[in-house]
Image (tube, coloured by chain):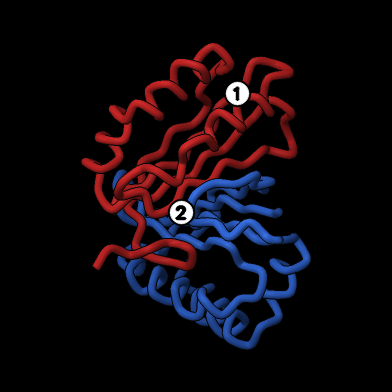
Chain colours: A red, B blue
Amino acid sequence: MYGLIGKMKAVPGQRDALVSILLEGVSGMPGCLSYIVAQDPADPDAIWVTEAWDSQASHKASLSLPSVKDAIARGRPLIAAFDQHVETVPVGGHGILVPG
Amino acid sequence: MYGLIGKMKAVPGQRDALVSILLEGVSGMPGCLSYIVAQDPADPDAIWVTEAWDSQASHKASLSLPSVKDAIARGRPLIAAFDQHVETVPVGGHGILVPG
């Protein structure tokens, strides 16, 4: 499996708008086992996105989906910075559909 | 909702053992919406755990569950350090059961 943990900073005042864009279409991405968007309570502009995919290829393919490309285009102007970007290898857990 | 993102370092050579302890009983914790244990491919000792709960109270209550207390007792000696501990407020996503 392939995972990502990322922290981004929204343009001040735009976090809610960016979160809603990030949440659009998250259930229509083949191979996506988990995709959670969270606020950072310690920073009014910060957003954490934690992801788990059945493979890195599935994640890469998702970036070509029309819905995702559209969300990226609309979301990008609302992103001030990418603070943290970690690749992981999910092993398992709850709320994750471990591929067959 | 309440979320946690944590990075810990296993005692060298003990990551697999620690991961399996962390994964035991993860599906029996009331209020747990997502709990994913992942390896860090860039560090052979590092583990990432990303969690989402319906409330902070549910998370706190989970620490009193016999299964969790037992896992903590067995896992603690295998943990060399806690590198990162972030509290978040999950908003939504895929693979997360947004409470009613």
Residue drawn at point x = 40 percent, y = 29 percent: A67
The chain identifier of the residue carrying mark 2 reads B
B58 and A77: which is toward the camera: A77
Residue A17 found in image quarter? top right
Residue B88 located left or right of residue B97: right
Report the chain holding disc 1: A
Q: Which residue is mark 1?
A: A9
Residue A62, horizontal then vertical, whole percent: 31, 35
Q: Are marks 1 and 2 on the same chain?
A: no
Residue B95 in the figure: left or right of residue A68: right
- Determine which residue is flagged by label 2: B48
Q: Which residue is situated farthest in the bottom direction here? A: B66
Local crowd size for mark 2, using a 10 Å CA cut-off: few (<14), some (14–19), many (≥20): many
In the image, taking residue B8 as reference, residue B67 lies left or right, namely right
Q: Nearer the viewer, residue A49 or A31?
A: A31
CB-based contact (under 8 Å), mark 1 and mark 2: no
Residue B53 location in percent, x, y?
A: 65, 61
Compared to residue B94, the image places residue A97 above or below, namely below
Residue at image position (49%, 50%) is B94
**What element does badge 2 sit on?**
strand
Frontmost of labels 1 and 2 is: 1
Report how far apart the C-alphas of labels 1 and 2 lie in the structure: 21 Å
Disc 2 marks a residue whose amino acid type is Trp
